Amino acid sequence: MIPVFGSQVVGILNVDNQQRGTENRKTKTKMRFTVLASGSGGNASLVQLAGFGVLIDVGLGPRQIGSRLAQVGLSWSAVQAVLLTHTHGDHWKEATLLHLHRYKIPFWCHASHHTVLRTYSDGFLALHAAGLVRSFEANTKFELAPHLHCRALPLRHDGGATFGFRLEGRGDLFGQGSALGYVADLGCWDEELATQLADVDILAVEFNHDVAMQQASGRTPQLIQRVLGEEGHLSNVQAAALVRAVLQRSTAGRLRHLVQLHLSRECNRPALARAAAQLLLEELGISIGLHTAEQNATSAMLHLNAAAPPVRARRSPKRQTRNDRPIQPMLPGFADQSELRP
Ligand SMILES: [Zn+2]
Ligand SMILES: [Zn+2]
């Protein structure tokens, strides 16, 4: 039995740890998602569709990723590609890039990540020399596999160019394709981002900190301001507001699971993050699975093995200030230190 870490049923929940390896043909066309680790100690999540697996970030070493995959009955053989969000040190590890090269696993990142990775990673140079580096562009759909598309969503964060992702499976005879939205490491959000995340089945969002805990943390004023700033991390309240905006732009009943990512160890508590989300869901009268990812354990595997009910869309987006300031480039050699501590 695989433990269900930090997960709780809020109404209709569709988590099934007993089904791995026994899905029928229908479920094989549906997406699966699990968070292997989330937080400033290292980040990695797995998205699977029809036998094709993508890791979002590789912020753990290769053996640790292997053991986290084993917690949900998988291994590195389930990984066919890697997507990088940004170059902060909790989102990639040199040993893992070397591992990707050794096993010929393509590594997708943005062209602006190349400069940092060329400087600090022999693994990246080896991947590049082997033709295994693939580049994505912001706001442009690209193909990870013939049946799996992705769009990189630019985020405001002080880690150089930073992206969230919208992954979408091609629809099949059984209906619409599954979709996942993933955004972590962002200091603020805007209407465009909420629109790009609308109508997904799984929404994974950073609930980084509680503002009062952050302010009372005893950290330096500079660090507190960085975390709270527009290029830092989302508070529980900011994250809940983003989820609300996404739901307001989505077809009612489409979203099945909300996954809370990148919780601060020092300045948040799972109960606080969950309360912020539960308050919103209760207020909106929405029943979905609520899952809080952990740093030290693999979360439950989410299976999208049932069609979402067709219900009319609601469109009453809340006005949110849009901020188009460019993201600051990351200082060379600042990767590990610049990651905001939990
Ligand atoms: Zn991070
Ligand atoms: Zn970061």
Image (spheres, grey):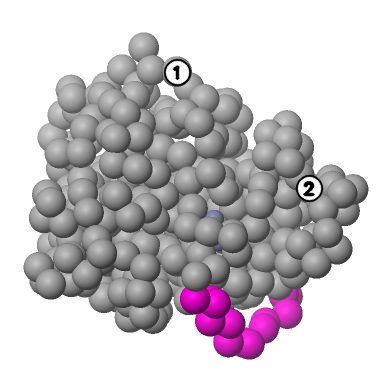
Give the labeled residue for mark 2: 210
| Looking at the image, residue 147 lies above or below residue 304 | below
Q: Of the numbered discs in the image, which one, if any, rests on residue 3?
A: 1
Mark found first going from the N terminus, 1 or 2 = 1
Crowding near the residue tagged with mark 2, few <14, some 14–19, many ≥20 C-alpha atoms within 10 Å? many
On the image, the x and y values in percent for residue 303 come to 34, 35
Q: How many C-alpha atoms fall within 10 Å of the one at disc 1: few (<14), some, or many (≥20)?
A: some
- Ligand 2 is found in which quarter of the picture? bottom right
- Residue 323 point in image, percent of width and height: 67, 83
102 or 37: nearer the viewer: 102
* Separation of marks 1 and 2 at Cα, in angstroms: 27 Å
Q: Is residue 311 magenta?
A: no
Q: Position of residue 316 (x, y in %)?
A: 67, 68
Residue at 73% in and 35% down: 269
From the viewer's perspective, tell me whether residue 76 is left or right of residue 89: left
- Indicate left or right for 115 with 285 as reference: left
- Residue toward you, 326 or 176: 326
Residue 339 in view (yes/no): yes
As shown in the figure, which amino acid type bears the numbered disc 1? Pro
Name which residue type carries label 2.
Asp
* SS for dot 1: loop
